[in-house]
Amino acid sequence: MLNPQEALDRAHNLVSQAIKAGADAADAVYVCDASTEVQVRLGQLEDVARSEGEDIGLRVFVGQRSATISSSNMNPDILAGLVTRAIDMAKEAPEDQYGGLAPQDRLLTGAVPDFDGDDGLDPDPALLRTAALECENAARAVSGVTNSEGAGASAGRSIFALATSHGFAGVKSGSGYGMSASVLSGDGDAKERDYDWRTTRHLADLDSPFNIGTRAGERAVKRLNPGTVKSGQMPVVFDPRVGGSFVGHLLGGIGGASIARKTSFLLESLGAQLFDSSISIVDDPHRMRGLGSRAFDGEGLPTARRSIIENGVLTGWLMESASARQLGLEPTGHASRGIGGAPGVSTSNVHMEGGSVSVSELIADITHGIYVHELAGQGVNPVTGDYSRGAAGFLIINGEIAGAVSEFTIAGNLKDMFAAMTAANDLEFTRGTNVPTLRIDGMMIAGA
């Protein structure tokens, strides 16, 4: 794998070639990565996979016309042909009055900050195998676990470089480690499955294989002998591993492209009180060792910590340059770029703040409700906010979590759900999007 400077040179050289060949403006993205993954099942090695790859993408502008093209072949002759084809394609493309590179005066200048996202290690596959086996053994050791779908451990490193014709050049490298286990409990037709996983930037930050495996096993056993739920309206409490999906729906609804196209359920919600005043949702791209940390976005603009929801109020849209121009606003440093296509938008490390009570206090007054730990299906309408998804979890009876339940549907409208949401104080930073345990009253349940 190349070093960061070599990666940046490749992107910069391709941009220079495009300008010399007649493009009015251009940017290029270079990505390379290498990863090793080990899978075990029932105490035996099942698979060891090693992957290495590199790709480069070029976007060129000829006036207000643009085209993108990419290649995984770094042969200089191939790249020269890539430049020619991209310019020819751009000349035939329709004009886009909102297209173009990011505003030059908004670009990140000076040294690119480092958020300690790369520990520089390359663990031996034998170490990953040992960790995966320990993880699965811990899961299988939980009383009631009867079978295993396996456990895995992975390690990888990646480099992302971006260069533009109007003066930006930036590169970042990152390491990544993961571990997971998935096991089954019960016998015959009464089997239940569950899992646990963790990912980190530094190997030293990864939770122990024993803890990950034990949580997977305990979750699978708790799901045994699920009952049914009677249909009705009741409070629903969401485990943190599924509650983050609500933040995802919020972010999808405030993307600049959705607002510009008028295809969002939050179209008229700028400055509106969407959540309780105790809740804030923060995007923090500068968190040290954060899974999504970045100093610059996909267009070369600097990033900054931002409260997307502040005391319950929606503070603004997430915009790359094209949607910002269409809306008559400024880009927000949330552009996301792959090797193909125009930039989209994405966040970095997002979390929800505002919980002030424990989980037990959050559910104490619920006489009959549901604790959801798994969601299924994609029944969310991004235009209307209507929400309907399959779920599994546990009953809450008189303030206590009781027996497992499954095969029911929860439904509502996202705006109503946001307004009714309250949070516990158990926030942990283990994912890219982190939320505490959440409670939403008045949801419709369709069960038996």
Image: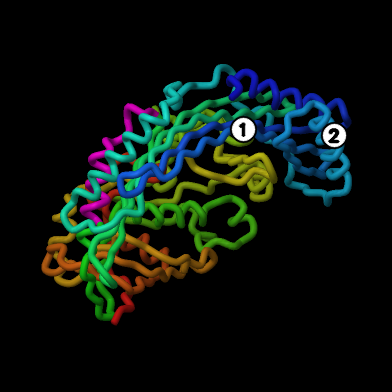
Image coordinates for residue 327, horizontal then vertical, percent: 64, 50
Magenta segment: 202-219
**Display colour scheme:** rainbow
Specify the quadrant that holds the N terminus. top right
Along the line of sight, which residue is nearer the eye, 150 or 62? 150
Q: Residue shown at 37%/33% (left/top)?
A: 128
Which badge, 2 or 1, comes first in the chain's sequence? 1
* Label 1 CA crowd tier, 10 Å (few <14, some 14–19, many 20+): many
Q: CA distance from mark 2 to mark 1?
A: 20 Å
Query: Is any part of residue 351 visible from this angle?
Result: no
Q: Which amino acid lies under the numbered mark 1 shown in the image of this protein?
A: Val
Q: Is residue 110 above or below residue 399?
A: above
Q: Is residue 40 above or below residue 438?
A: above
The image's mark for residue 379 is none
- Taking the image as shown, residue 256 lies to the left or right of residue 203, namely right
- Taking the image as shown, residue 84 lies to the left or right of residue 106, namely right
- Taking the image as shown, residue 209 lies to the left or right of residue 19, namely left
Along the line of sight, which residue is nearer the eye, 57 or 267? 57
Q: Residue furthest front?
A: 44
Q: Which residue is mark 2?
A: 81
Q: Quadrant of residue 129?
A: top left
Image coordinates for residue 214, horizontal then vertical, percent: 22, 46
Q: Quadrant of residue 144?
A: bottom left
Image coordinates for residue 211, horizontal then vertical, percent: 23, 41
Q: Is residue 148 above or below residue 24?
A: below
Q: Which amino acid lies under the numbered mark 2 shown in the image of this protein?
A: Gly
Q: Secondary structure at mark 2?
A: helix
Q: Residue shown at 25%/72% (left/top)?
A: 234
Is residue 343 magenta-colored? Answer: no
* Label 2 CA crowd tier, 10 Å (few <14, some 14–19, many 20+): few
Q: Which residue is mark 1?
A: 31
